[in-house]
Amino acid sequence: MITSAVRTLATELTGDDLPAYVYDLTALRAHARAVRDALPPGLELYYAAKANPAPAVLRALAPHVTGYEVASGGEVDHVRAAVPGAPLAFGGPGKTEGELRRALTLGVERFHVESEQELRLLAGAAEDAGIDTVDVLLRVNLPLDGERVDGEGVLGAALGGAALAMGGRPSPFGLDPEAVERCLPRLSPGGPLRLRGIHAHLASGLDAPAQVAVAAAITDWARKLSERHGLGLTEVNVGGGMGVDYAHPDRRFDWAAYGQGMADLALRHPGLTLRIEPGRALTVYCGWYVTEVLDIKHSGGEAFAVVRGGTHHIRTPATKQHDQPFQVLPTDTVWTRPWARPAVRDEPVTLVGQLCTPKDVLAGRIPVAELRVGDRVAFAMAGAYAWNISHHEFLMHPRPGFHYLEE
Ligand SMILES: *Cc1c(COP(=O)(O)O)cnc(C)c1O
């Protein structure tokens, strides 16, 4: 599970170098290449930068992605600087007028418009800047209720098991279908805004067949909208949300099946460019949060291991209420203390961090063969929504080190 490059560094780092985020960029590149190869050639792959915007990660992905999805003015500036020239699609709710102006100045390639007010702000900003063509995708919040999606019930069935539904129910994201229709007059030829297509990001945590079903429902809806109004839409962005399984790190999203399904979908819609924008499923596997065991004790009959660092560095298990998968890297330090090296053997142990809150749990009651003070622990699946979603300042512990490994 852990790559040899990460394991080697994890054992070389001293206690004071820990905790550390270690990213295997070679493994990331291989994974991104395999994903790209599984997708039909005409399908555009964007990376959702919010999953992990580290410049080294953005750059490692560059040869394998068409562009980047950005969701704030900060991300627009950051990604433009990290990978100059790469196409950007600017989404996200609550874009300010200043952010829109800045994005226009930087020549952002696609705007994912989330509301009627945003469409007006964007048109005004484009006019002020003297820009006569701005490429727009309207983000739609398609209802899950089958009756309302062409009577097929596809979306509802597909989203039944979604971990985190972003749409299909009352939501601050995107436009209801009726609102999309109301926007169309503002996108008529002659104005600065050119409607290129439809964007949707309805759920995360779906498996490949469900993702294909959702993509088909979005695409069919967009196609009918285009035909009904003679829009000549050429693009559909069906979002990200490809599932990853923290309980089974080896069970990966079936990109081959997904690619096959999307190839079939593309065949049914000639002339339409399909686009996806995954984040987590691209980068989650490339990162490890490596730390060491500081203390081991029993309380009320249960074993606890306190590790250096905690959820202020890797908030993922607290946010998602899961056990972060980990691997023990036994470390044979020379034990010079005049007491026995604290250890647990063949029993479940709860791994917690250094924070003074009961929520600082990284993994609960996981059976281990042996865990001793001084052993290294490498938490896997820490390459996405980990460091960058965490509350770093809480309790003023030192920041982790960052290592980006390349061959
Ligand atoms: C967060 C987000 C994504 C990426 O989602 P993942 O679950 O990381 O694949 C894509 N598109 C939009 C609009 C998002 O908000």
Image (cartoon, rainbow, N blue to C red):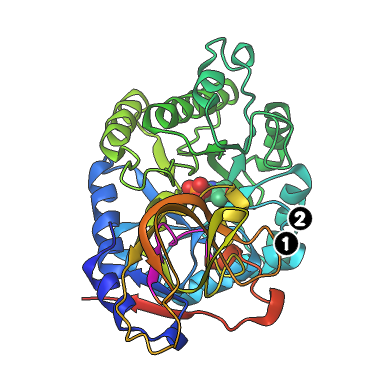
Task: Look at mark 2 in the image and give the residue it sits on.
Answer: 121
Q: In the image, is the residue at mark 2 within 8 Å of ligand 1 by its beta carbon?
A: no
Helix, strand or loop at label 2? It is helix
Q: Which mark is residue 182?
A: none
Q: Horizontal and vertical percent for residue 6?
A: 29, 71
Q: Residues within 10 Å of mark 2 (few under 14, many from 20)?
A: some
Q: Horizontal and vertical percent for residue 27?
A: 26, 63
Work out whether 260 lies above or below 107. Answer: above
350 is within the stretch colored magenta: no
Q: Which mark is residue 125?
A: 1
Q: Horizontal and vertical percent for residue 255?
A: 30, 40
Query: What amino acid type should be assigned to the residue bearing mark 2?
Result: Leu
380 is within the stretch colored magenta: yes
Residue at (71% x, 41% y) in the render: 186
Residue at (66% x, 70% y) in the render: 355
Task: Look at the image and tell me in which quarter the C terminus lies.
Answer: bottom left
The answer to whether residue 66 is visible is: no
Task: Look at the image and tell me in which quarter the N terminus lies.
Answer: bottom left
Q: Nearer the viewer, residue 152 or 178?
A: 152
Q: Horizontal and vertical percent for residue 306?
A: 54, 69
Query: What amino acid type should be assigned to the residue bearing mark 1?
Result: Ala
Tag count: 2
The answer to whether residue 175 is visible is: yes
Q: Residues within 10 Å of mark 1 (few under 14, many from 20)?
A: many
Q: Nearer the viewer, residue 118 or 245?
A: 245
**Contact (CB < 8 A) between labels 2 and 1?**
yes
Instruction: Give, as a single range, the part of the protein colored magenta.
Output: 375-386
Q: In the image, is the residue at mark 1 within 8 Å of ligand 1 by its beta carbon?
A: no
Residue at (42% x, 78% y) in the render: 340
